[in-house]
Structure formats: structure tokens, C-alpha cells
Image (cartoon, rainbow, N blue to C red):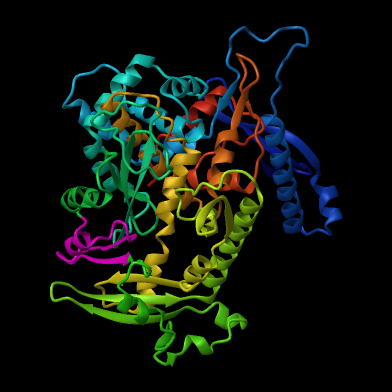
Amino acid sequence: MYAAINGTGNNKSVYIMESFRKEDGRTSSRVFRKLGKLDALLEEFNGDKEKMMEWAKAEAIKDTEIHSKKSSMVTVSLSQSAYIPLNEERSFNVGYLFLQKLCSELRMDNICRNIKNRHHYEYDLNAVMTDLIYARILSPGSKLSSYSFCSSLLEPPKYELHDVYRALSLLSNESDFIQEEIYHNSNHIHPRNNRILYYDCTNYFFEIEQEDELRRYGKSKEHRPNPIVSMGLFMDGDGIPLAFDIFPGNQNEQTTLKPLETKIIRDFDCSEFIFCSDAGLGSKDNRHFNSFGNRSYVVTHSIKKMKEEDKSIALNPKQYRKVGSKAFIDLSTIDETDETVFNTIYYKEIPIVTGEMDEMLIVTYSPKYKAYQRKIRNSQIERACKTIASPSSQRKGKNQNDPTRFIKQTSLTQDGELADKTLFDLDTERIAEEEKYDGFYAVITNLDDNIEEILKVNRQRWEIEENFRIMKSEFEARPIYVRREDRIRAHFLICYLSLLVYRLIEKELENKYTCEQILDTLRKMQMTLLSKNSGYTPSYKRTALTDMLHKKFGFHTDYEYISKSSMRSIIKKSKEIRK
């Protein structure tokens, strides 16, 4: 709308004009509102025509806003006496649209087209794979329940359930190709930090008794007496999964590194990086393997398992330094009640020269870490005391942190012979032995970088543990409802891809929200269909998190009312690639 003066001679008036389109398609204008006679208005503005027109234009802007609001209002007819249609789905999840945006930008459709050139099948592999990812993130369960959940999305499956199981076998065969392509494509969304690569292993148990080639009896991290499979996972320096593989449950974890790392070096164009892992996977052979080709390593090292001579040097309180300082400090002289001292990290460098590999052992001491360890142990000691006071079983647990390790058993003797009675008491010697290591931590490396950078590399290792936690708890990677080896491998591929997509969402949200907040929001983003011939209304809470999602991904599902045509446009946008 705009302001205009119309009329002839002394009979001129000021109007707000509205533009419109005629039936023949041509544009025209008409009077929307009359503001008054020109002479009368000029008199009000003391003859200042310029000020009068500024006021008229401001009125035109107000009318435009009011009119646009009224024109955007909709009326929906609902009956108090009519039943909703039988078996009609009325609640739809729209949180998957943000996942769909990322899957589109990862070019999963192109990957599936390349796979189809090598295989013959009729179903839509991209639809099956992406739907399984959406279901794993939003409603984890069996493949049957995933298929049912996807029926509640705005775009229900156009394939059949049996196509899902056929696709699993295909995904297993193409797992390496998919991981390689996803890695390269993900650089367009978030440039990958492949300067540092973290590696770790975990295992998943199966509630079966009979072994097969993949599911084998081995050392379970959950101490379950069941066959297991092992997963090796590489993560980049930003916490985003890089590659994974599955191994038989009885295979030594240390032997899982080289095959997967060789594949990354060959297929992912990653040849220069710092390898970081825990002591269990940082064997001498694995460290030696990462000493070539401009590769280096930072690996945790157990002080308790050192030779007595090296252990004595490491625990000696003298010749420590503050990070960033060259002056030597005696740890026995520092005041750990001082806040600055409490939050300071001290370190000592111990060269290890064997001729074959020249390494540096870096031992750190943190009063804050010491206080944390003692707090945990005191809690365990309290539980041990309760166990001693209880007449229940005193059986030792298998976990190295089990409180019963602090309980010692003493058999009474009478006249030189063992009596029937057994006493249980706190093992103070065991407690004192463990306390010697409180606050100390060690890494072994072949890097010549400054100490602060080396320690920073190692500190990020917690993120790979969190990746496993998310897969096991939030994405319910187990129980695994498939039996065939190829489908088991495909199941873990879907879990891996789901984790990668989730981590990319975290980066889009600038790491401002926790895993629980993000997943809870996406899972609750439901849209209600008002009637068959009408549109949708959001039935979720609008928050700062949903606002940020909409802003980052370039579409909105948080209008009070969304017509079906508008929803089709939103779905289309969720499949477009951002420039």
C-alpha cells in the first residue's frame, strides 16, 4: 500500500491506495482508505506538504501491516459431533526434517545411486537408509518398530518392510564405500579436523549362548557371560566419527587398529595426523605403526604398570614444572588449599630411549584430579564398610573399581588350627597403595610439541567415550534384533551414521546444548493435522533451541498454522543443499 493525492483543481484528497491484480492478470490499484481533503490536512500541518506526506506514508505502512495480518488469518471448521476418521494418522514428527537436511547435504542420494550402478534392486535404498537413521535417532528400536515409526513422519515409507531387510544386506556389503563417501561429503558441512585422530574400542553382547564366526565369547566390558562383537571407532579432533569396523568378540583389541587405520590412510586421504588412544590400545606395535609417514602419537600410560625404577622417578615429587614455566617445583612443598595451586597442572618429562623408538613419558600431577579421585574412593570405602556390616555375601566383584576390593578376609585360628569363623575388615594397605597414585596421570608420545599442546590433545579423548555412550544409551545400539552377520554389520553402520548426523547437528547448534536437550527436542517436535482438507498446527513447545534449529536450517515449522501446500514447500526445503 502507498499514499497518493488524487483529484482535480481545488477538489483534491489524500488516499491510501492498494495494488491488486485483475482477473485478466493485469495489475491495477484502488482506494483502500481516504485520509482526508488535501486543504484540510495541509492546514493541520501548517502548510508543510512534506510533513503531511510523511505522515500519510506512515499510515500506509500501518494499514499494510494490519491488512497482511488479517489476510494471513485462517478459519478452520471443526465439528463437536463428528468423529475423527477411523485409522487416520493425525500426529506427525517434524524433527526428522532437520536430520533430512543433513542427509541431503551428505549427498546420501548420490551415494545410493552409485551403489545401484553395481547392484540390481527395485526399492529406494536412499529412503530405507535415511529412514533407519531418523528412527535410530528419534525412536530407537527394532527394524520393525523403525518401519512403524517412519509411518508417523510427514513422508511415510513407499517401500515394504521386507525391503528393509534386503537393504541391510546391501548396506553391509557397501559399508566401506559409504563411510568413505560420507567422510568426503561431510567436509562441505563442517570441515573435518583430521590433524588429530582418536581411536577406541567397545563391545556389544548378544543374549544368546551359541557362538558363530562374528559373535564370540570374549572379555565383555559389561562383564556379561554372553557372546560379543567388538567395534573399533575413529573420531576426528572435533568429536565427529570418522570410520568404524566390527570385529569378532574374541579378537584382541590391539590388533583391530592397523586394518582400520590402513583403510583411513588409503581411502580417506588422511596420512598426516596425531594418533591418540588409551593405554590398552597403545601397545608398542601400535605406537611403532604410528611412527611412520608423518604420523605421531599421544597414548595414555599406566603408572601402576611401570617398572619399579620408572615408577619411582614418576612419583618422586621433585623436578616437576608448571605448564608454561621452566622453573622446577617440589610437589611436597605446594599448598593445595590455595585455589590457584589447586587448579594448576604440574608435569615432569622422562625420556625413554630404547634405540628402536625414542619416546617421551610425560607425567602430570593435578591437585584437583587428586581431590576427585579421593572423593570417589571415599564413597567406595563407605560402601565397603556397609558391605562388611551386612551379613550378605562378600563376593569380590570383577570390576577394578568395585568397593569390595577394599575388604580383606581373615580366618581365625584356635590352638594352631583354622576356626570356622571368618572376619572381614577394611584393607588399609590396599587403600594406602592406591592413594600413592592420586592426582598423577601419564602419556607417552613421540611428539616434540610443547607440553600444553600434547596434554590438550589427550584431554579431548573423553569425547570418543561419549560417542560410545550415545550409541549405547540414547540410540540403543543393543539389543540387536537381527541375527545374520551381514545384517548385524548393517545395524552398526546405521548406528554410526546416526551418530555422525547427530554430531553435525551439535556443530550447527554451536555446541550450546546437551545431547539430552537436542534429542528430547527433536523427538517432541510433533505436528497435528487439524482435518483432512485443512493444514497443520505445531503441538510442541517453541524454545530458544527450536528457534536456533529453524534459523540454522533455513525453514520454519513453528507458525501457528501451516497449510498443506506450505508444508510441501518446507519438506522441499529440507531436501535442498545450502549454498
Residue 7 can be seen in this image = no
Residue 362 can be seen in this image = yes
In the image, 544: left or right of 227? right
* Residue that lies at the very extreme toward the bottom in this rendered image: 327
- Position in image of residue 95 (x %, y %): 53, 35
Residue, x 55% and y 77% (percent of image)? Answer: 343
Number of numbered discs overlaid on the protein picture: 0
Q: Nearer the viewer, residue 521 or 205?
A: 205
In the image, 375: left or right of 126? right
- Position in image of residue 450 (x %, y %): 33, 79
Highlighted magenta segment, given as a residue range: 270-299
As for residue 291 lying within the magenta part, the answer is yes
Quadrant of res 193: bottom left
- Position in image of residue 170 (x %, y %): 25, 26
Q: Nearer the viewer, residue 566 or 93?
A: 93
* Residue that lies at the very extreme toward the front in this rendered image: 415
Q: Is residue 451 above or below residue 85?
A: below
Q: Nearer the viewer, residue 108 or 303?
A: 303
Residue, x 26% and y 34% (percent of image)? Answer: 111
Q: Nearer the viewer, residue 34 or 434?
A: 434
- Position in image of residue 494 (x %, y %): 36, 34
Q: Is residue 159 above or below residue 153?
A: above
Residue, x 30% and y 70% (percent of image)? Answer: 444
Quadrant for the N terminus in the image: top right
Quadrant of res 219: top left
As for residue 125 lying within the magenta part, the answer is no
Quadrant of res 484: top left
